[in-house]
């Protein structure tokens, strides 16, 4: 919450109460090293506000969720965000045995059907349905989100963030999953070197997500800046009053 730029997937921070990453396990925490993945994405002088993130609702999505995610992404990264018109969930992504949607197929749908015409640097799909991936020997493993590493697309689901949670808590979790998954799309691996940072791996408990700030820690921000060639806002905490509203 990994694969090659086009195909290996980075999964969001938790699956029900289980963290998941599709990267092979390493000897220890993996640093957030975006700066060693090739030349900067953007030309010199590009501002964070020049980077456009489009939210693509897939099926019915609560407008309050979209607003919170838009505000949260802008607060964390300084990017300009906007929501696209809702689109139907692709039938090709439906996994009938578990009545879920395959997250990797949703990403492929975004790449093929949304990215070309959206006019956005990043596309973040959002849905209320349950989504899943293949993990180890599990053909259908429920997740909160998925992103292709160092790419243009990510997807998040509110299905698990809202289960058994107060509305405010659910919205906060959803925003944190969004900034986490965009971190993967911007080239960051999981990094547990500093507790509470945006790219922490949940490692089996939703409490890890709840403990995250939702914004990049300094080393994460610097890694993204090196990868993008763009200065990000120096924020240390999410302004939840602004993001969630009254």
Image: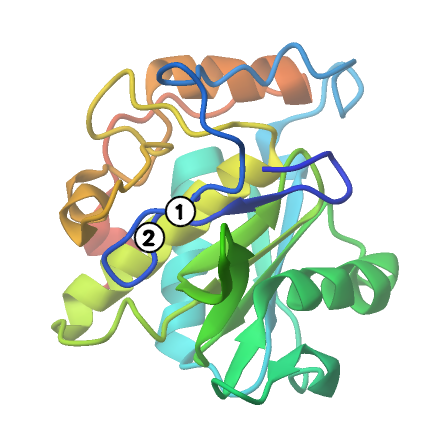
Q: Residue at x 30, y 70 (%)?
A: 160
Give the vertical position of 220 relative to 82 (above or below): above
> Along the horizontal axis of the image, is 78 left or right of 96?
left
- According to the image, what is the colour scheme of the structure? rainbow
> Along the horizontal axis of the image, is 43 left or right of 58?
right
The residue lying toward the viewer, choosing from 135 and 85, is 135
Q: Residue at x 26, y 53 (%)?
A: 242
Q: Residue at x 49, y 88 (%)?
A: 99
Mark 1 / mark 2, whichever is N-terminal: 2
> Along the horizontal axis of the image, is 218 left or right of 83?
left
Distance from the alpha carbon under mark 1 to that under mark 2: 6 Å
Residue 209: % across, % down: 23, 46
Residue 42 in view here: yes
Residue 233: % across, % down: 43, 25
Callouts 1 and 2 close, C-beta under 8 Å: yes
The quarter holding residue 213 reads top left
Residue 210: % across, % down: 17, 48
> Along the horizontal axis of the image, is 109 left or right of 234?
right
Residue that label 1 marks: 20
Q: Residue at x 62, y 12 (%)?
A: 35
Residue that label 2 marks: 14
């Amino acid at each position: 919450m990994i694969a090659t730029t086009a195909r290996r997937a980075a999964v969001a921070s938790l699956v029900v109460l289980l963290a998941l990453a599709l990267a092979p396990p390493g000897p220890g925490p993996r640093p957030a090293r975006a700066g060693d993945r090739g030349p900067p994405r953007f030309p010199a002088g590009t501002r964070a506000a020049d980077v456009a993130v489009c939210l693509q609702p897939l099926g019915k999505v609560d407008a309050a969720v979209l607003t919170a995610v838009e505000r949260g992404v802008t607060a964390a990264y300084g990017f300009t965000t906007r929501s696209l018109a809702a689109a139907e969930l692709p039938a090709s992504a439906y996994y009938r045995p578990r009545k879920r949607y395959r997250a990797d197929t949703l990403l492929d749908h975004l790449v093929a059907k949304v990215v070309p015409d959206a006019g956005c640097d990043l596309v973040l799909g959002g849905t209320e349905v349950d989504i899943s991936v293949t993990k180890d020997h599990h053909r259908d493993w429920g997740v909160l989100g998925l992103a292709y590493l160092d790419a243009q697309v990510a997807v998040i689901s509110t299905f698990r963030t809202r289960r058994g949670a107060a509305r405010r808590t659910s919205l906060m979790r959803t925003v944190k999953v969004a900034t986490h998954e965009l971190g993967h799309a911007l080239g960051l691996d999981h990094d547990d070197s500093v507790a509470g940072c945006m790219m922490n791996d949940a490692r089996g408990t939703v409490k890890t997500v709840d403990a995250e700030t939702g914004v990049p820690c300094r080393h994460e921000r610097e890694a993204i800046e090196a990868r993008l060639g763009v200065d990000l806002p120096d924020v240390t905490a999410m302004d939840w009053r602004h993001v969630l509203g009254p």
